[in-house]
């Protein structure tokens, strides 16, 4: 609100006065357009205006740098830009970030542009095209917001781009005349970054589709058996991948390349959530992948934007194992509760049947009581008989439950076996299994696709932040297996 008030009451009127003064000066001095800003200032106010203009340029440059960081981060979140190192400078505000690579890039390009142009005229021409382009894009986006978000009337929504867009097109036609006098610079930058973003998004989508298409089926894992077709040795294997569901195809490469695999396999997927810090007790989400005797789990590790993943790997492993133990205990407890609920339903059904039986016997007793005197009268001279009818003994027996049903989850032998196997594997240590994937275009692909995937996307993958640098994996406990994704 304060920014809106300041812009409306101070900034905007000052801009109008400055532009009106420059226009009035140009009307009297039409040949002084090269240094119109400083020529229109009185000589007595030159140095104060120079200081204010320099400070304004510094503020504007800071705004441009912050906007660049924000745009790059959002593009990375959408999967449209290569992974870069992001440093969050505030624990309270998510948007306050710093990207070292982009900061150095902006500095180098500023030096190159100034050294090439060597005058403010060409830089002003480039700035004019960039500014008008931003205005046109803003108008188009606001029109979409009016149609999709605000649900504005179609006629009113179309009037907005017609009014403002027509003025902006006039401005664009004026600044395009300076295209070869410096105006080509923003268009060249836009083309370069659009090519990088399109290449990265195109290659990433094809790679992810290939991973989803080639993931290992559950039937294949069941056919391999609990030993996975190889030798299971004590230890925990942490296999990092990007799939949230299913078994990645890189795991099959490990089975084919290694003579043995670990007794416990955990598929770890790193996900970043839009919160500052994720509590340690909520860091990991587990799910069982195969039957219990396979000892395979899916783990989603969640990190906030202020969480620093430079912790000691021993502490990371310890926290992961503790979370896995909690998951096993909770799973056993939920299974016991479900079984108890099923048994309760069965007991209720038995009680209902018992009540129906008693009601049936009660009706039978009423009929027998009507016949008892007659029968007793016929047998008065004989041996006496009891007239009391006994209920069947089976209906009086208590419901017998298996002893395993009555045991608590902590006393479950299956749970104790899994926990002991997990502790034994932890004593043998953890190994980080990483897949080094290479993306290649199929042989029957078009030439343009081969050029984009094999060279441009391959270059970006090799030079972006990823692998051990992105996950902070200790190099002493790493096993890497290469795999080629044919897209």
Image (cartoon, rainbow, N blue to C red):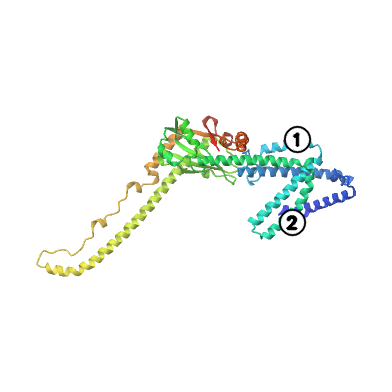
**Residue in the image at 82% along x and 43% along y:** 51
Residue 418 appears in view: no
Element under label 2? helix
284 left or right of 54 in image: left
Between circles 2 and 1, the one closer to the viewer is: 2
Residue 326 is situated, as x and y percent measured from the top left of the image, at 46, 43
240 left or right of 151 in image: left
Instruction: Name the residue nearer the viewer: 178 or 31.
Output: 178
Q: Does residue 289 lie above or below 482 as drawn? A: below
Residue 439 is situated, as x and y percent measured from the top left of the image, at 57, 35
**Alpha carbon separation for disc pair 2 and 1:** 38 Å
**Residue in the image at 52% along x and 40% along y:** 211
Instruction: Name the residue nearer the viewer: 11 or 122.
Output: 122
Q: Does residue 183 lie above or below 256 as drawn? A: below
Element under label 1? helix
Quarter containing the N terminus: bottom right
Instruction: Name the residue nearer the viewer: 258 or 417.
Output: 258
* Number of residues whose C-alpha sits closer than 10 Å to that of mark 2, classed few (under 14), some (14–19) or many (20 or more): few
Residue 163: give its label. 2
Residue 335: give its label. none
* Number of residues whose C-alpha sits closer than 10 Å to that of mark 1, classed few (under 14), some (14–19) or many (20 or more): few
Mark positioned earlier in the residue sequence (2 or 1): 1
**Residue in the image at 75% along x and 47% along y:** 131
Residue 118 is situated, as x and y percent measured from the top left of the image, at 81, 36
**Residue in the image at 68% along x and 60% along y:** 155
Identify the image quadrant of residue 475: top right
Provide the residue designation for mark 1.
112
Residue 124 is situated, as x and y percent measured from the top left of the image, at 79, 43
Q: Does residue 206 lie above or below 475 as drawn? A: below
Residue 297 appears in view: yes
Quarter containing the C terminus: top right
């Amino acid at each position: 609100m304060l920014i809106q008030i300041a812009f409306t009451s101070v900034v905007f009127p000052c801009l109008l006065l400055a532009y009106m003064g420059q226009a009035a000066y140009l009307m009297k001095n039409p040949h002084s357009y090269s240094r119109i800003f400083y020529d229109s200032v009185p000589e007595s106010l030159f140095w104060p205006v120079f200081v204010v203009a320099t400070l304004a340029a510094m503020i504007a440059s800071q705004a441009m740098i912050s906007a660049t960081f924000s745009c790059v981060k959002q593009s990375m979140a959408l999967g449209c830009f290569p992974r870069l190192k992001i440093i969050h400078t505030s624990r309270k505000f998510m948007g306050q970030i710093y990207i070292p690579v982009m900061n150095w890039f902006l500095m180098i390009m500023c030096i190159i542009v100034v050294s090439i142009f060597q005058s403010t005229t060409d830089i002003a021409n480039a700035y004019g095209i960039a500014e008008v382009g931003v205005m046109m894009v803003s108008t188009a986006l606001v029109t979409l917001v009016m149609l999709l978000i605000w649900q504005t009337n179609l006629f009113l929504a179309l009037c907005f781009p017609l009014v403002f867009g027509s003025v902006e097109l006039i401005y664009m036609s004026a600044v395009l005349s300076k295209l070869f006098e410096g105006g080509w610079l923003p268009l060249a930058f836009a083309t370069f970054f659009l090519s990088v973003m399109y290449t990265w998004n195109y290659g990433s989508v094809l790679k992810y589709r290939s991973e989803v298409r080639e993931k290992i089926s559950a039937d294949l894992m069941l056919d391999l058996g609990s030993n996975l077709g190889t030798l299971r040795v004590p230890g925990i294997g942490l296999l990092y991948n990007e799939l949230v569901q299913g078994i990645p195809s890189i795991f099959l490469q490990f089975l084919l390349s290694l003579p043995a695999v670990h007794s416990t396999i955990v598929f770890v997927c790193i996900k970043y959530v839009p919160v500052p810090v994720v509590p340690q007790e909520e860091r990991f989400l587990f799910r069982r992948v195969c039957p219990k005797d396979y000892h395979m789990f899916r783990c989603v590790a969640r990190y906030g934007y202020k969480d620093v993943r430079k912790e000691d790997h021993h502490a990371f492993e310890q926290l992961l194992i503790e979370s896995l133990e909690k998951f096993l205990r909770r799973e056993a407890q939920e299974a016991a509760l479900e079984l108890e609920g099923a048994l309760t339903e069965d007991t209720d059904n038995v009680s209902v049947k018992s009540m129906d039986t008693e009601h049936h016997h009660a009706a039978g007793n009423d009929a027998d009581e009507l016949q008892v005197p007659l029968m007793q009268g016929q047998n008065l001279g004989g041996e006496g008989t009891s007239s009391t009818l006994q209920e069947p003994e089976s209906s009086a027996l208590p419901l017998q439950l298996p002893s395993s049903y009555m045991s608590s989850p902590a006393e479950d032998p299956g749970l104790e076996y899994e926990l002991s196997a997990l502790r034994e594997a932890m004593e043998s240590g953890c190994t980080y299994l990483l897949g080094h994937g290479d993306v290649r275009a199929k042989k029957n692909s078009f030439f343009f696709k081969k050029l984009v995937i094999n060279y441009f996307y391959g270059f970006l993958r090799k030079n972006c932040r990823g692998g051990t640098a992105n996950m902070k994996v200790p190099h002493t406990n790493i096993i890497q297996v290469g795999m080629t994704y044919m897209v």
